[in-house]
Image (tube, rainbow, N blue to C red):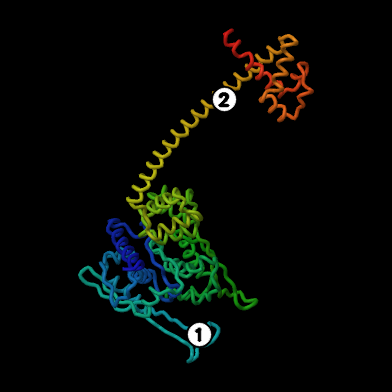
Amino acid sequence: MDDQAGQGATSAQMSLQLFEDMSGQPIDESTKEIGFKRNNLFVAISGLGLAPRRFIDAAYFIAAQDPAQRDYYDVDLNYFKWLMRYDSRNVRHLRSVIKDAQRVLIEVTDTPPDRAPTEDDRWVSEQLMGTVGIGKGRIQFRIPPLILRHITGPEKHHWLNLCITAAFTQTYSRAIYDYVLPHAHDGLTDWLDLDVMRSWPGKLGKSASEFKHFRQKYLEPGVKQVNELSDLDVAYETRADTPGSKKINRIRFRIKRKDTVASMLARQPESHDLLLILRNEFGLDTKQFDAIAQHRLDWTDERIQQAIEYTRFRLNQGKVTKSPAGYLMQALSHNWRVSEAERKMVVIQEERAKAENMVATAKSAASETVAKSVAQRDQEARERMNNEVRLGREHFEAADDKTRKDLVRLYVVSAQGKLTLKRLQLDASALSDGNILGHSDLAWYFGQFVFGRIKPQVRVAR
């Protein structure tokens, strides 16, 4: 099974499991997002009331989870009714809803809106729903192949959240939401003929032809409910096409998407800490949270936690060098996880590094001890030599003239003295007992020489 098929099967299984877990709660109270990528082709369909829209949503959701196109779909009836938030046990009414959905057609044409169609223009008219059967607690339905191809095809699409659409109780709120949803990214729809909008739920009373009545009874309540119950904030603008005319016949909508993070925190309180980690620690942006919301059915808390641990694990290894948020989204999308073998490998590497560090620390401590000992011995040797030079100098200064002259003469002709005088570039003939101590470097070496002459006497004295 390929990734797409596997993901579809997983979503279908999880939505069914969620239905079983909620024990009678309606779908709009779910804390998990349930929806599918709906083709933009299906947003402006006329003559479709609230309940038939929900029926179409449920059927298309089931088809969207299965990438393999099927002749018939067969599911549990109670599960299907839960998806379309149909709480009634009135079978006669349910049949009526299904027939209403079957009567609605969708038209596709390449005829520009500003001219009449010709025989060369492409035009297709097709039912949204084919044959439907109910019996023994099951529902079977057939989606026409042309429609089915668009449901699972690669065309432009948007995310339809059944938990949101199930909350609408007014036909116009649902119709407006359907129309503006594909334009949420742009923030603005095109201008729309008001008569087209009036036809969305089917026939309206005569009073709806007057804009003030249409606005008061349908438009304003619909917009208000979209703003209260959905993930969008919607406002509208109107105009008259004819200059100088007061007749309003055009409308367009401005759309602003609500804060996805705030919405998820409100709808999924049990995931509060996990979502805050995504926002605060990894810095996920609105687009990334939108993706999580769209896949929330199979991107469970456990899977998100797994992706967080995997990203942290790779961060600690230095493997994440660009965007931690982007890396986490990849981990989430591909279901990456840290294997037990990798965890064990890291533990072993850490223990080995710790042992090596202890050995290195011990070696460093030993080297430092040796270095301190050598430095101490060097210091002691320097102090000893300085003391010997001092004793030699004191002896020279205290000696009589003859002894002083003899010591200078002996130093000048000695190998030690010749080498020192040569290095210091001094003339031996210019030295005497009166000036030999005037040169600091020479005085030090001369004092050492004198001490060597009197060393036996010093030892005897000690």
Q: Position of residue 313 (x, y in %)?
A: 41, 49
- Residue 194 visible in this rendered orientation of the protein: yes
User: Mark 1 and mark 2: span between their CA atoms?
Assistant: 101 Å
Quadrant that contains the C terminus: top right
- Judging depth in this view, the residue of 368 and 420 nearest the camera is 420
Write the residue at 62% across / 78% down: 242
Q: Residue furthest left?
A: 136
What numbered label is drawn on residue 265?
none
Name the residue tied to disc 2.
Answer: 378
> Up-down: is 432 above or below 322?
above
Quadrant that contains the N terminus: bottom left
Q: Position of residue 228 (x, y in %)?
A: 46, 58
Tell me the mark number nearer the camera, choosing from 1 and 2: 2
Q: Secondary structure at mark 1?
A: loop
Q: Position of residue 98 (x, y in %)?
A: 32, 74
Name the residue tied to disc 1.
Answer: 111
For the image shown, how many numbered marks are present on the structure? 2
Mark 1 burial class by Cα count in 10 Å: few <14, some 14-19, many 20+: some
Disc on the earlier residue, 1 or 2: 1
- Residue 31 visible in this rendered orientation of the protein: no
- Judging depth in this view, the residue of 107 and 6 nearest the camera is 6
Q: Secondary structure at mark 2?
A: helix
Write the residue at 43% across / 38% down: 357
Does residue 371 appear to the left or right of 343 in the view shown? right
Q: Residue furthest top?
A: 461
- Kind of residue sitting beneath label 1: Thr
- Judging depth in this view, the residue of 161 and 310 nearest the camera is 310
Mark 2 burial class by Cα count in 10 Å: few <14, some 14-19, many 20+: few
- Kind of residue sitting beneath label 2: Asp
Q: Position of residue 329 (x, y in %)?
A: 44, 58
